[in-house]
Image (cartoon, rainbow, N blue to C red):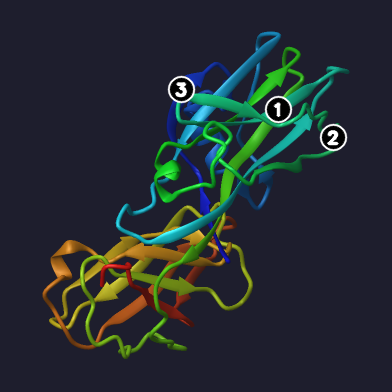
Amino acid sequence: MSFIFLYPAGAGDNTALTAEPVALANWEATRDIYTTGGVISYVYNTAAIDDDLYVLDSIPTYLSIFVGSVTVYALCRKTAAPASLFQILLRTLGSNDSSSTIEPSAVEYTLYSNVWHFNPTSGLPWTAEDLADLEIGVTLQNVSGARCANIYTKVEVNFLGEKISNSSSYQPSDVIHVNQGFSVVAKENQGRSLAGSSTLQIKYKDPDGVEGTLSGLVIDQNALFASVPAATNTKTGKWWFKLYAVLAGGEILEGVPFFTNVQPMWV
């Protein structure tokens, strides 16, 4: 199994919490949280009980995957209020489901999570189609009693495809034919997490020398998955790929120690 990490990408079914700083939308305050100084943005409640839901990054619909569990994480802490409580929320197929009630740490931000092994609304195993409908968030209780900074989802998946190449540097690969509907995975080999990075891309150069970038989803914390653009679907030959990321502390990471083609089932 591999893991795809999906982060808030917009407002969901409900927006009742308050963002800090106020210039950010709520989903932005819970998506990008880390600098070298730690937590810089979060959401909190101004009523006795409030909740937020966020839509997520999308997974290409053509990709063939088997979905296992869905885990939602929330990085939260308690402030001065003595009875600060929260729940992790998940919304699918038009209905909400929640974790048990959690009392967060008053000392420091702590990462909490809840796992759903089945779709809670249908009671059936997760499908790739369910992920397109997914929203996540939190419910906060007691006025200004808790803060939640980073909220994201880890989806357990099997890629139904074939690994066909590896490379230890930015050089022509042995990918001879790349079609629309194929995908590239680029992995950072130093064990550094890509979560919270301000820029995540896979750069490419096609056989005719045309260059571009692919926006990626984080897989297994230190790899990116990106789909090949439609404009390349008639070309064959050697390809160049390079991972490019600006990490949370500002470090620029470049390199392609690993990449692969993920082939949909119909190929």
Q: How far apart are labels 3 and 2 at the CA level?
A: 28 Å
Q: Quadrant of residue 159?
A: bottom left
Q: Amino acid at mark 2?
A: Ser
Residue 37 x %, y %:
68, 48
Residue 16 x %, y %:
55, 16
Query: Is residue 21 placed above or below 194 in the rendered structure?
Result: above
Residue topped by disc 1? 87
Residue topped by disc 2? 105
Mark earlier in primary sequence (1, 3): 3
Q: Which mark is residue 13?
A: 3
177 vs 97, left or right, is left
Secondary structure under the numbered disc 2 in the rendered image: loop
Q: Amino acid at mark 3?
A: Asp
Mark earlier in primary sequence (2, 1): 1
Mark 2 or mark 1: which is in front? 1
Categorize mark 2 by other alpha carbons within 10 Å: few (<14), some (14-19), many (20+): some
Image point (33%, 72%), residue name: 263
